[in-house]
């Protein structure tokens, strides 16, 4: 038994009353937090005639048909939209993870001319509201001839660490890694590249996992960028498809929209639960004792 | 902020005198802007040769907003056109209306506007005045794009600055939709087209009273530009006079007063419920959510709204003389000014509005068939009773229409949302009708400048 | 791995103080040169992205902010109008003033509460126990809903005059308002929505808590420190870089909030401009009124204002953020 496990075991027996309180607090919190989602699920089972007028959680008559009808609403079924979303999200995860980690290592650990200047610029790119960049960016991608290949404008920017949020996130995490580890490695003869590979990379798992989770979820939910660059129905992703149900000037299929919204939560939820597992075992118990 | 009407030449002159900073930025931006132009020009090099041969392959991009049923019919018509003209192929894109304009504008700004795209009268002038749309006038004049079977006002309602900027895909008229079932339960007679505004408000009050206040008689349309527009025309005014407002603060005060009276008398719901109804979403209309007996919508929405409620709905014109109405385009097809194949674009649009098979395929999902000759043929194919009601309504009101105004000018989108905000200040009691009207006029002027 | 086992014993006793080895290494000239080269090697993808993808659009938008550019203008029609957009904003635009006030209230109330909620839940869900993953997932669920259409419909249904919130309040004999449809309360419902979606900072806190060496807690326990003391003297200092990150980023994102207000108010910022957040106003000017030049000016004013705020946050960070790498920046 490691010291950690023993430590936890001791604590558990000592604070069992505290544990119970904690559980009650958590469950009460959950009920509060999940009520709106229960409402979405409830609404996905309401008939179209009921959905606008009945705003309670439960449907008066249970209508499961939105799930099948919604799935096949368009010439291309939701299977395709889910695949498209998954592909784009996974590519983004990889692109963001690699590129932001590399950039963050430079900012957090290496001393080079104009580091402070570039760091300020990096933070600066976070500050400008994105709406005014949509058109200029489109013009740039158009100039590069990328418009006809939607994956390029969607993925290449991520592979070039343009998501400053993640660079900054990783910088902050790396700065939490004791520098003495680098020193020890350097004394052992490691170059900056070696330090990155042997010290920083293994210890950056929490930051990488966090980045993966956010990259996946935010890409999954991103409507606007995908809307601008995807033109063919076969290329559409889930968020674009969900908005096809809504036509404010004509017929909206709200029931189908709710049903597909519920289903669209499933993959991201599973992705989250799978990846957060890596946050459970922190670096202290596994990362260093290899 | 249109360059032509720009008052502040002094400012721009001063900026030209400042060297350095501004010039560097300008140069930089100019380079970035010029790049696509250069690339674009290179790509367009061989156009002229292509268009002279009628059988040369042509690919057109088509873009619209709408749901799956609209996509299905539109694609079917495009496919039929392709069968008749095998050299013409289409790349069609459709999406929900949220984000439609954003994508269209982004593409247009990048010099990539689709060859054919769908618009409505809220944005037609916005694009036409900035020369994004193709001028279809020559094709209309030589009848290769034939609008002679259209109601005259409908054809004219696509003309901006003397150019045919859009061709109506369907016709539409503002319509009041009321809850037949609930009215029958309450024992209140259904209202009918031609009722005066005052009589209508009195009728609505009666509904409220008889329901014990549970069902207010009508939504308050004072934030709704189309209701205000019809009312103004009945007073001999217009919403717009060219590029300016066609009415005064006094007119607007009277309009706000009219509805303030209605609210105070209980004919309408309270301000917070009215706010829900001010959303343009069909599913939030109060007649559907059961929070009012009447909603101010469009004549072709009867079928869509009926699907969101179990009650039976009825349709009538907005109050007052139907002369205040005109044949409006619910949606247009417009071409891109940058298209390489303007002739084909015009021909495709012509096919959509004048071909009998196409008209039957399209049905009245976008609105009533614009071609009067084809309207009867389309009517025979309709099975949905609500769609039939919409079409009958349109047929009956068409002869009573007044002359068409010009489509709303550039800046209308801003004025329209401004009206919602300002009217709500009155509804919530945060401003008097007179104050609000004055605010509206002042702010609207700057939006239209 | 000899390397990592050896170094694992080196736990900094005083976070914030530089080790002797670090001080010594600073002097070495050739190592410094090698490090500088490596720095640019590692930075090169980011630099390429900056030059190729980020910088040009940003500078273009800066240029456009001095013009009367409208989305649909042809480039030849774009006219340089100098500072006019900026002058108008500060002298003759009530909506601008309104949106600044709305955003200030929104961000200043929402961000601290959201961070507090995220930290509290993260602390409760930090330790490993059976089912903790599910709990984390469930608490994250609201954030998964993002800014979807479904979200807008839920919120208006819950906070409408006849919605679930008022039904709940009526158990206690309270008659609620029409929250989401009342200009005095609509912003409040948006703030609640912002807090409700506390998943992102929660995950970052969780990841940060994992970085706190367990040895520190053990040492503190041996010294007999209470859990409360441990929180303030071990957890908080060690968590401070991550807390700092969350504070900076959530502040920026709070001021940039757009989607929820957009979907709930149908893009209008209503009722009566009560939810007209700054970026929503910017979007309205840019994409529904097509004044992209003016919208760009709004964006650059925003960048300046938030930039100043960020600098202030960074300078306060010197006093309370402790980096294990020994550099206080």
Image: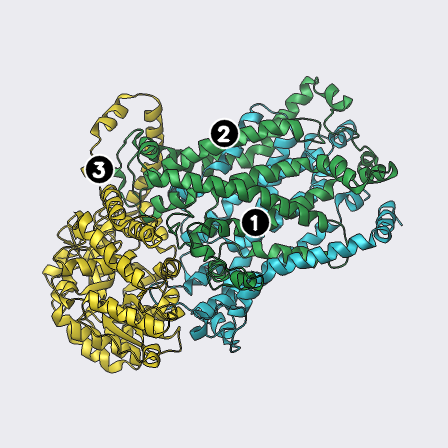
Q: For label 1, count other residues whose C-alpha is less than 10 Å away and answer few (under 14), some (14-19) or many (20+).
A: many
Query: Mark 1 sits on what residue?
Result: C195
Q: Is residue B70 above or below residue B236?
A: below
Visible in this render: residue A27?
yes
Work out how far the residue at label 2 is from the one at label 1, CA to CA, in angstroms.
25 Å
Where residue A103 sits: x, y (%)? 59, 36
Measured as percent of width and height from the top left, residue B88 is found at 27, 64
Q: Name the residue under label 2.
A: C308
Which element type, helix, strand or loop, lies under badge 3?
Answer: helix
Q: Colour of chain A?
A: cyan
User: Is residue C229 rendered to the left or right of residue C70?
Assistant: right
**Quick check: marks 1 and 3 in contact, CB under 8 Å?**
no
In the image, which is nearer the foreground, mark 2 or mark 3? 2
Determine the chain carrying the residue at label 1: C
Label 3 chain ID: B
Left or right: B189, with A52 as reference point? left
Viewer-nearest residue: A235 or B86: A235
| Residue lying at 39% horizontally and 57% vertically, measured from the top left | B98
Real-space Cα separation, disc 2 to disc 3, in angstroms: 34 Å
The residue indicated by pointer 3 is B3
Q: Can residue B304 be seen in this view?
A: no
Label the yellow chain with its letter: B
Check if mark 2 and mark 1 are on a common chain: yes
Work out which quarter of the rendered image holds the C terminus of chain B and state it: top left
Q: In this view, does A266 lie above or below B48?
A: below
> Which secondary structure, mark 2?
helix
Observer-side mark, 2 or 1, equals 1
Residue B79 placement (x, y as % from top left): 31, 70
In this view, the residue farthest toward the left is B142
Quadrant of image for the N terminus of chain B: top left
């Amino acid at each position: 038994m490691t010291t950690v496990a023993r430590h936890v075991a001791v604590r558990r027996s000592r604070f069992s009353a505290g544990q119970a309180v904690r559980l009650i607090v958590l469950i009460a919190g959950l009920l509060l937090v999940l009520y709106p989602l229960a409402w979405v699920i409830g609404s996905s089972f309401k008939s179209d005639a009921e959905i606008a007028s009945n705003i309670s959680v439960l449907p008066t008559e249970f209508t499961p048909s939105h799930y099948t009808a919604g799935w096949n609403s368009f010439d291309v079924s939701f299977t395709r939209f889910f695949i498209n979303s998954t592909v784009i999200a996974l590519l983004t995860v990889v692109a963001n993870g690699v590129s932001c980690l590399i950039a963050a290592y430079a900012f957090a650990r290496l001393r080079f001319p104009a580091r402070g200047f570039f760091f300020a610029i990096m933070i600066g790119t976070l500050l400008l509201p994105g709406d005014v960049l949509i058109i200029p960016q489109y013009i740039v991608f158009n100039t590069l001839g990328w418009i006809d290949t939607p994956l390029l404008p969607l993925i290449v920017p991520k592979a070039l660490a343009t998501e400053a949020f993640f660079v900054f996130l990783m910088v902050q995490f790396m700065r939490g890694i004791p520098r003495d580890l680098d020193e020890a490695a350097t004394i052992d003869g490691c170059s900056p590249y070696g330090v990155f590979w042997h010290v920083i990379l293994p210890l950056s798992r929490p930051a990488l996992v966090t980045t993966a989770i956010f990259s996946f979820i935010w890409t999954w939910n991103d409507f606007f960028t995908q809307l601008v660059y995807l033109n063919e129905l076969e290329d559409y992703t889930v968020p674009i498809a969900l908005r096809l149900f809504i036509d404010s000037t004509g017929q909206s299929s709200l029931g189908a929209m709710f049903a597909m919204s519920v289903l669209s939560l499933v993959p991201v939820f599973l992705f989250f639960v799978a990846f957060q597992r890596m946050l459970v075992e922190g670096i202290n118990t596994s990362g260093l004792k290899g | 902020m249109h360059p032509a009407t720009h008052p502040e030449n002094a400012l721009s002159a001063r900026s030209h005198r400042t060297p350095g900073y501004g010039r560097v930025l300008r140069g930089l931006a100019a380079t970035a802007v010029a790049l696509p132009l250069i690339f674009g020009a290179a790509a367009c090099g061989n156009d002229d040769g292509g268009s002279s041969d009628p059988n040369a392959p042509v690919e057109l991009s088509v873009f619209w907003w709408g749901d799956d049923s609209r996509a299905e019919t539109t694609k079917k018509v495009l496919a039929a056109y392709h069968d008749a003209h095998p050299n013409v192929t289409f790349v069609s894109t459709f999406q929900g209306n949220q984000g439609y304009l954003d994508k269209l504008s982004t593409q247009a700004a990048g010099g990539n506007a689709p060859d054919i795209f769908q618009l409505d009268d809220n944005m037609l002038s916005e694009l036409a005045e900035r020369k994004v749309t193709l001028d279809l006038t020559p094709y209309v004049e030589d009848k290769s794009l034939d609008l002679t079977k259209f109601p005259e006002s409908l054809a004219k309602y696509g003309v901006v600055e003397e150019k045919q900027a859009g061709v109506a895909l369907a016709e539409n008229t503002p319509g009041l939709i009321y809850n037949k079932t609930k009215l029958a339960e309450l024992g209140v007679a259904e209202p009918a087209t031609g009722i005066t505004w005052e009589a209508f408000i009195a009728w609505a009050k009666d509904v409220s009273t008889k329901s014990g206040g549970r069902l207010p008689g009508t939504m308050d349309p004072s934030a709704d530009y189309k209701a205000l527009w019809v009312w103004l025309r009945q007073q001999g005014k217009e919403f717009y006079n060219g590029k300016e407002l066609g009415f005064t603060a006094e007119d607007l005060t009277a309009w706000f007063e009219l509805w303030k009276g209605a609210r105070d008398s209980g004919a309408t719901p309270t301000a917070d419920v009215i706010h829900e109804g001010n959303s343009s979403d069909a599913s939030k209309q109060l007649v559907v959510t059961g929070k009012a007996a009447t909603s101010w919508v469009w004549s072709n929405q009867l079928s869509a709204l009926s699907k969101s409620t179990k009650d039976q709905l009825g349709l009538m014109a907005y109050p007052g003389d139907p002369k205040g109405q005109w044949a409006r385009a619910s949606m247009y097809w417009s071409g891109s000014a940058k298209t390489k194949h303007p002739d084909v674009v015009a021909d495709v649009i012509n096919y959509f509005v004048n071909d009998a098979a196409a008209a039957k395929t399209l049905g009245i999902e976008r609105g009533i068939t614009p071609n009067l000759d084809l309207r009867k043929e389309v009517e025979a194919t309709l099975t949905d009773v609500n769609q039939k009601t919409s079409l009958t309504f349109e047929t009956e009101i068409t002869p009573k229409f007044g002359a068409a105004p010009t489509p709303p000018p550039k800046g209308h989108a801003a004025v329209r949302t401004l009206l919602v905000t300002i009217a709500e200040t009155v509804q919530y009691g945060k401003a008097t009708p007179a104050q609000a009207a004055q605010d509206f006029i002042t702010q609207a002027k700057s939006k239209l400048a | 791995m000899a390397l990592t086992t050896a170094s694992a014993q080196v736990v900094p006793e005083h976070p914030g103080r530089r080790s002797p080895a670090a001080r010594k290494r600073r002097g070495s000239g050739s190592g410094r040169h090698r490090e500088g080269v490596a720095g640019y090697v590692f930075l090169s993808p980011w630099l390429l992205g900056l030059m190729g993808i980020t910088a040009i659009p940003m500078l273009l938008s800066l240029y456009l902010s001095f013009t009367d550019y409208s989305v649909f203008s042809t480039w030849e029609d774009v006219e340089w109008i100098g500072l006019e957009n900026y002058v108008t904003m500060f002298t003759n635009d009530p909506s601008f003033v309104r949106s600044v006030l709305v955003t200030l209230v929104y961000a200043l109330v929402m961000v601290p509460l959201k961070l507090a909620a995220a930290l509290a839940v993260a602390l409760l869900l930090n330790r490993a126990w059976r089912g903790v993953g599910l709990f984390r997932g469930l608490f994250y669920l609201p954030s998964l809903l993002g800014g979807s259409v479904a979200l807008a419909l839920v919120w208006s249904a819950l906070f409408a005059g006849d919605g679930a919130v008022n039904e709940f309040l009526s158990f206690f004999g309270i008659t609620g308002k029409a929250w989401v449809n009342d200009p005095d309360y609509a912003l409040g419902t948006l703030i609640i929505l912002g807090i409700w979606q506390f998943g992102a900072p929660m995950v970052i806190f969780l990841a940060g808590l994992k970085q706190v060496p367990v040895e520190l807690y053990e040492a503190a326990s041996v010294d007999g420190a209470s859990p409360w003391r441990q929180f303030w003297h071990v957890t908080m200092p060690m968590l401070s870089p991550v807390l700092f990150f969350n504070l900076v980023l959530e502040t920026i994102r709070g001021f940039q909030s757009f989607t929820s207000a957009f979907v709930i108010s149908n893009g209008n910022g209503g009722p009566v401009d009560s939810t007209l957040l700054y970026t929503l106003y910017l979007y309205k000017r840019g994409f529904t009124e097509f004044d992209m030049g003016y919208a760009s000016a709004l964006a650059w004013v925003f960048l300046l204002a938030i930039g100043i705020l960020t600098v202030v946050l960074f300078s306060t960070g010197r006093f309370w953020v402790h980096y294990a790498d020994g550099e206080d920046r």
